[in-house]
Image (cartoon, grey):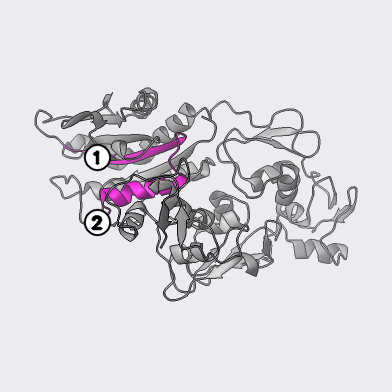
Amino acid sequence: MNNLQVVVDAGHGGTDPGAVSSSGIREKDLTLQIARYMYEEFQKRGVPVTLVRSTDETLSPTERVNRILDAYGNKSNVIVISNHINAAGSGYQGAQGAEVIYALRNNSTLANNILNALGNAGQKVRQTYQRRLPSDTSKDYYFIHRNTGVTQPVIVEYGFIDSPEDLSRIQNNYRSYVDAVVDAVISTAGGTTIPVIPSGNTYTVKSGDSLWSIAQKYNTTVNELKALNALTSNNLQVGQILTVPGAGTPSQPTPGGNTYTVKNGDSLWSIAQKYNTTVNTLKSLNGLTSNDLQIGQTLKLPGDIGETPVESNTYTVKAGDSLWSIANRYGITVNELKALNNLTSDNLTIGQALRVPSSETGTTPGGTPNPSNTYTVKSGDSLWKIANQYNVTVNAIKTLNGLTSDSLTVGQQLLIPTTTGTTNTNKTYTVQSGDSLWSIANKYGTNVNTLKSLNNLTSNMLQIGQTIRLP
């Protein structure tokens, strides 16, 4: 599997606390803590990932499954990790250790790899297994297995909340356990034996890479990499092979001295970053009136290379922004953005000024997106309404903006996929061969229950040529 996509689920939530320890620790709080960290770790490794819930909210089984299937579609390359903490039932008194439960449609490879990784991380382990529905043994017992199409779902039980020893291990070591699970998933998907810098004019994407970090290694720009590889977005897949400029080995800045000779792929911003200065300082020092450079051109560098750079290219945080959405907008990773701004947490404040790369990834200087590709949320808006207006799906907007829920804030700026621009006037859809209610709902940014209610349907059966009313 070389096109891994991951959906991370935090079990229970809201009015459903899950299991509760004798000291009052609730399963829903631990699973959310685990899921948030897991989401960040998959992001750092460059794996497309969606978080089912990022807050303490109540989700029905139907809504949870809908969010899972809405993330990347009903596809076998999608791995669903539902995080849970066990509780002792009949015959389990004094039980300790992790368990992994997998679906009847899948083999045990992923589950076994996860359990072994947890054991190597220091947690006690019990078993991997499948569980059947007593009333119909051809079906899975758990809805997270039964109703998630052809995806690969696993339930990871990290230990027993009513075992003080297990609970202590989970609370103290959950980050190590999550790292183990993430590594096991990527390893099972075939993402471990990736060279850092291969020979020739290609580069194989590894975990944690971004277009920006690769561009920096090869002294080029994000735009040049995208042009060389006909990329229309900043998204990368682990194992993806990219064409890179030059001889296939990273260039290095001239050590020492106060000049620098421009190489193929250099930009003022990349040079400024290497020497801990700013584009404006370099332009002023060299009498430049534009950002254009020539290969072989000699640039003067500041006398004190170690000085703290003056912030020149900045982005002002707006309502609805996150580190991920800003990093994605500029073609860098969250970690790179945090390092650039000396941030120690993911918290942002409206009006906060962040240092960002130059406008080479599709935004204007200062971080304002191209107006034709943005939408400002108004009172009464919903993701579905906006998606319908621009003929795109809700999931496309959520993915582009790093959204993990359907909630919007008035004044929030949304990036709209560039293939949009026309208003959707269709109110009906004619069923074609291969259609299902789920595929139609996903296409039009709605859900199966809404379509069934709107069309007075009592089952999921469709007929070719049938006309379906749309919201």
Q: Residue lying at the far left in this picture: please name it.
A: 90
Residue with the mark numbered 1: 85
Q: Magenta segment: does it hold 233?
A: no
Q: Is residue 24 left or right of residue 321?
A: left
What segment carries the magenta color?
Answer: 58-87
For the point 72% across and 51% down, the residue is 223
Quadrant occupied by the C terminus: bottom left
Measured as percent of width and height from the top left, residue 172 is found at 31, 41
Indicate which disc, 2 or 1, sits on the residue closer to the N terminus: 2
Packing grade of label 2 (10 A; few <14, some 14-19, many >=20) is few
Residue with the mark numbered 2: 14
Q: Residue lying at the far bottom in this picture: please name it.
A: 379
Judge depth for marks 2 and 1 and give the one in front: 2
Residue in the foreground of this view, choosing between 438 and 48: 438
Q: Amino acid at mark 1?
A: Ile
Residue in the foreground of this view, choosing between 63 and 92: 63
For the point 33% across and 38% down, the residue is 173
For the point 42% across and 36% down, the residue is 79
Query: Where, by quadrant of the figure, is residue 195 drawn?
Result: top right
Q: Secondary structure at mark 1?
A: strand
Q: Secondary structure at mark 2?
A: loop
Q: Amino acid at mark 2?
A: Gly
Measured as percent of width and height from the top left, residue 64 is found at 32, 49
- What separation in Å lies between label 2 and label 1 (alpha carbons)? 16 Å
Q: Is residue 455 left or right of residue 23?
A: right
Residue in the foreground of this view, choosing between 5 and 95: 5
Packing grade of label 1 (10 A; few <14, some 14-19, many >=20) is many
Image disc number at residue 399: none
